[in-house]
Image (tube, rainbow, N blue to C red):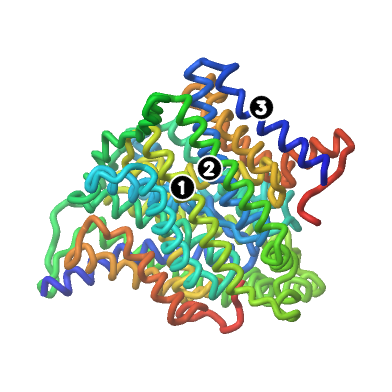
Amino acid sequence: MIFLQYVMNGLIIGGAYALIGIGLTLIFGIMNVVNFAHGEMYMLGAYFLFTFFSKMGIPFFLSMILAIAAVMGIGFIFEKGILKPLRGRSIDTVMLSMIGLSLFIQNLAMLIWTPVPESIKSPLPMDSFTLGGLYFLPQRILVIAVAILLVFLTHLLLKKTKIGKAMRATFQNLEAASLMGIKIDRIYSFTFVLGAGLAGASGALLAPIFTVHPYIGNLANLKAFAIVIIGGLGSFTGAVLAGFLLGVFESLGAAYISSGYQDAVGFILLILILINRPTGLLGKVGQTR
Amino acid sequence: MRGNRSIALIFLCAALVYPIIFRDPYFLHMAILGGIYTLLAISINLLLGYTGQLSLGHAAFFGVGAYISSLMYLNLGIPIWGGIIAAVFGSAILGFIVAKIAFKLRGAYFVIMTIGIAEVLKLVALNWVDLTKGPMGLTDIAAPKIDLGWAGLIDFGQKMPYYYLTLFFVVLSVLLQYRLVHSSYGRSFISIRENEDLAASIGIDCYKYLVVVVIISCSIAGIAGSLYAHYVSFIDPGVFVFFISVNAVMAAIGGGQGTLAGPILGAMLFTMIPEWLRIFGDARMAIYALVVIFIVIFMPKGILFYATQLLNVGKRTDGR
């Protein structure tokens, strides 16, 4: 029973991991940008929730929506201000610029919010309830519910809407898509803003469970990359699957091996994948860059 | 070529007399740290500048060198000389494993793999308390003393002897880099950087050469770690921090990747820049990040390139 409890806890955190993972994989797959600032979007999501809810006293759910919107706004500024002028530059140049950007956001956050870790007290009841012998905290239920909802909405967006179709076309063939009259610039902006919003949502969802400090983006970033590679670069379903897998394995690893090495689990999974199936769980064979 | 050699000799002479002219301990301190960063920058340059593979986790190999060397001294009483050799082997073996796994694929995979290895090693250093003392770190890592009999005693615990020790390894690495780059290996490295498919088509075993260059690169990073540990005499899991990796990469790029002198120039600059930025107080690292972005976007060929262009010398040493 306790084993199932660990699996359940892992799945809940895994939901948030899936969100941050699909954001990164979309940005990589469509824009060919290795976005090292992705973890900072997660961090900003958490801090905006802290500012709106804990500092300004805006209702919790409204704060959450505002936080996600604010991260999307920042994503929009970065896309237009930095990524757009760098279009056509080598993938390494863009990657290093994003690393610089990530350092910048992190240290700016430290100046604005100070390095002191903050905690957000969730307004949801703190008593857990039992269901089928498993314990559930309302805040954690919220995490998994919202995560599944957002994954589902993103899926619908990609499959059913016109812009989703354009995004998939861009993913498959940039030149052909632009010849068909798809405005690549708009697709890029939309993709980056969407990815940033998903990472921000992930941060805002997990913030009331963990503490918030300016450096939480580092680990989030590394885990996001592990998820994306485990799932297969550019694969949406792969990222969702890998996000949940990572959550479960971390939870089990912390419980049965050592909690000190919990954050190393993603990397160990990553190595196992690279040794056995370098293109990731659902990556296309031959797609190696 | 001869011109370059005499310039190199002039710089070597300048480096040799530097501690005699600048006796201020702060200048010596910065020069020693600059030397250690030079080793890291050369290490990155071999990889990035000559084969085009970016590592953002060189702190891993630096840190492993530092920990191996320190633990050998503290637990077995082996001085830095043995420590450096062990550090080279330790870092090289780690690099070999990373390269074996990561070079099944290219580009972003190697970058993520190196960052990941540094993070995991940081966790190991934090959690393996019996060996590493965890977050407390290792203290009292002394620099060696050499008794020369009647000629006196060289105490490397003092700054000036340590400066020359560091300089020795810097010169050694520069020479190694020079020999390597001008050998058939170096030409193979550059061909991999320029076009891997083409290099493979003319019979260059790219995978083998990439593994070799990672091993050499990591060995040099290990030496840097060992020198660092015995210089500051204290290390903690902070030796694995991302900033060290980024700063080493920036030194190689900022100075001029794929050149021999670039990493040296860059390392000096990127040892000084974080110091100069102290005037900004808490905003220091944010400004540093802006410097990084600026160099990556506007000076991707490095300061050396723009300087030589300005002087209209225009001579490159990498055969590009």
Report the amino acid beneath label 2: Phe
Question: Residue A131 placed where, x, y %?
Answer: 14, 71
Residue designated by label 1: B223
Report the amino acid beneath label 3: Ala
Foreground tag (1 vs 2): 2
- Left or right relative to B153: residue B42: right
Residue nearer the viewer, B211 or A183: B211
Residue designated by label 3: B14
- Left or right relative to B136: residue A242: right
Kindly identify which chain the residue marked by label 2 belongs to: B
Question: What residue sits 57% from the left and 17% below the top?
Answer: B22
- Left or right relative to A141: residue A168: right
Kindly identify which chain the residue marked by label 1 belongs to: B
Q: Earlier in the sequence, mark 2 or mark 3?
A: 3
Residue A73 is at least partly visible in this image: no
Report which quarter residue B51 is drawn in: bottom right
Question: Residue B117 placed where, x, y %?
Answer: 41, 59
